[in-house]
């Protein structure tokens, strides 16, 4: 326990505990004199059973709880947020078990502790796609353990070269592809659930596969979808739009795995903003699968409208989108935020304003930090209809509006990881010449220095060299701040 005291002192007193805790953990791992500091030992401490005496006005009783639950609520929240940010360092099975045990104490559990535990559980849980249910795979606990102790990806690729997808999955690549909906993609345009595809595959190939998916839908369903498509384009009254939403939801729920395909046939994104807002507000079905129906609604109704946004979004559309995103945070990230930010032409001011509101009003700061880490450092997986894939780029397109968005995120007291800061610094060095007179670029750099100063010390001289070539109202302020690092 003594070896962990400095870490919990950070959680207790630091204004940015997640970042400082990560830095402390890195230093401790590098110090050979502290062999007791491991990720497993931290989780063992947090999960350690402890007797607590609960008293009220008339009696007292002893209850068995985890050690983390003896901490103040604010510290529990900070610890769980830290585990969410650094989840890749820990065993997913143990993290999931810790989060579930915290949530099992539903009575009297603090709101923010509950949110942090849910976010941790979401982060280490995999989407439960329906098509996998027919396969005889390992239990969830075995999956987490295998994931944590598995071979590196490059060895898995070698192991799969014999024709089977994976040694433990007795199904060929072609057989698997024939059962998979083509609706979700990573930053390279590949299916979110798909294996590595030929690099020369283009959007036309994807569209041919989608047409094949459409072909298996029966004529009755196609006729109903065509009827709904016509009604979507004509707004008669709010009550009729609500009825239309209910009919669309019923049809999609009856067809199950084909719901996104059906929405693609209906083309609800072509509705005017008022009609679209009514559809979004009423296309709820209580689904717990964030990457299922909620994502389908966002990427078929809202995303296409925002991808082509040039003027400020209408209040009615933004309001309904925010309410939906508050209920489905994970779907918001994969079906709205990632594809929007990866827009092929880069985001503009109108899109940046919408993204800023979604991030500030719908996501928790720890969730935003994790989102930024994936955006800047990880594989950007997203969901969209194939017909909109041509509007989305493989890489981030850096524009003044993106600089402004990142500044808004930093001003929202979001703590970036060291890896995220490294990527931003690299892009600042690359962009300094191109945006030498851009005030938005300068404001981002100034904000980064103010918010992430300790993480910028290794880059002090590189940043000074880059900023000396800029000519904005804040250039002198940035250089003055960098001098004090």
Image (cartoon, rainbow, N blue to C red):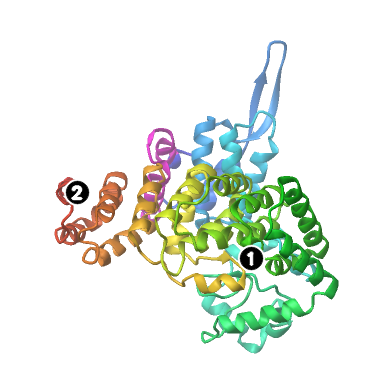
Question: Along the line of sight, which residue is nearer the eye, 251 or 5?
Answer: 251
Depicted 380 relative to depicted 320: above or below:
below
| Res. 291 image quadrant | bottom right
Q: Nearer the viewer, mark 2 or mark 1?
A: 2
Identify the residue under disc 2: 474
Q: What residue is drawn where x is 66% and y is 65%?
A: 267
- Identify the element where label 2 is drawn: loop
**At x 27% / y 61%, what residue is drawn?**
428
- Looking at marks 2 and 1 on the same chain, the residue that comes earlier in the sequence is marked by 1
> Alpha-carbon distance for marks 2 and 1?
51 Å
**Which segment is the magenta one?**
5-32
Disc 1, SS? helix
Kindly indicate whether the residue at mark 1 contacts the one at mark 2 (C-beta within 8 angstroms). Answer: no
Relative to 205, is 192 above or below?
above
Q: Position of residue 230 (x, y in %)?
A: 72, 64
Q: Which residue is mark 1?
A: 146
């Amino acid at each position: 326990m003594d070896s962990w005291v400095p870490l919990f002192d950070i959680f207790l007193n630091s204004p940015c505990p997640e970042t400082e805790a990560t830095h402390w953990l890195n230093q401790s791992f590098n110090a050979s004199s502290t062999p007791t500091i491991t990720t497993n030992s931290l989780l063992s401490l947090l999960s350690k059973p402890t007797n607590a005496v609960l008293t009220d006005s008339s009696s007292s009783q002893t209850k068995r709880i985890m050690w983390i639950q003896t901490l103040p609520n604010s510290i529990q929240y900070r610890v769980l947020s830290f585990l969410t940010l650094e989840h890749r360092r820990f065993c997913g099975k143990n993290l999931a078990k810790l989060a579930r045990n915290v949530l099992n104490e539903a009575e009297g559990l603090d709101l923010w502790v509950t949110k942090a535990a849910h976010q941790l559980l979401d982060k280490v849980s995999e989407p439960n796609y329906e098509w996998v249910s027919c396969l005889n795979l390992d239990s969830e606990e075995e999956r987490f353990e295998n994931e944590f102790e598995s071979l590196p990806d490059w060895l898995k690729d070698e192991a799969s070269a014999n024709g089977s997808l994976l040694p433990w999955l007795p199904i060929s690549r072609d057989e698997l592809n024939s059962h998979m909906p083509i609706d979700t993609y990573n930053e390279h345009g590949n299916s979110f659930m798909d294996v590595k595809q030929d690099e020369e595959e283009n959007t036309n190939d994807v569209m041919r596969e989608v047409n094949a998916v459409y072909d298996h839908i029966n004529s009755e369903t196609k006729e109903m979808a065509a009827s709904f498509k016509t009604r979507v384009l004509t707004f008669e009254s709010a009550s009729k739009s609500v009825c239309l939403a209910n009919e669309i939801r019923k049809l999609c729920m009856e067809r199950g795995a084909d719901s996104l395909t059906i929405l693609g046939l209906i083309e609800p994104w072509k509705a005017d903003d008022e009609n679209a807002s009514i559809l979004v507000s009423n296309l709820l079905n209580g689904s717990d699968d964030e990457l299922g129906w909620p994502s389908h609604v966002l990427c078929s109704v809202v995303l296409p409208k925002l991808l082509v946004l040039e003027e400020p979004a209408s209040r009615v559309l933004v309001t309904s989108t925010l309410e939906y995103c508050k209920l489905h945070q994970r779907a918001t990230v994969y079906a709205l935020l990632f594809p929007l930010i990866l827009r092929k032409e880069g985001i503009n001011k109108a899109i940046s304003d919408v993204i800023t509101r979604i991030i500030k009003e719908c996501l928790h700061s720890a969730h935003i930090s994790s989102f930024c880490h994936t955006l800047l450092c990880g594989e950007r997986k997203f969901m969209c209809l194939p017909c909109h894939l041509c509007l989305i780029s493989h890489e981030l397109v850096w524009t003044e509006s993106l600089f402004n968005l990142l500044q808004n995120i930093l001003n929202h007291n979001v703590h970036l990881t060291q890896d995220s800061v490294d990527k931003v610094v690299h892009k600042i060095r690359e962009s300094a010449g191109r945006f030498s007179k851009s005030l938005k670029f300068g404001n981002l750099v100034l904000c980064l220095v103010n918010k992430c100063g300790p993480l910028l010390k290794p880059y002090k001289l590189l940043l000074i060299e880059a900023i000396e070539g800029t000519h904005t109202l804040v250039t002198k302020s940035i250089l003055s701040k960098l001098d004090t690092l």
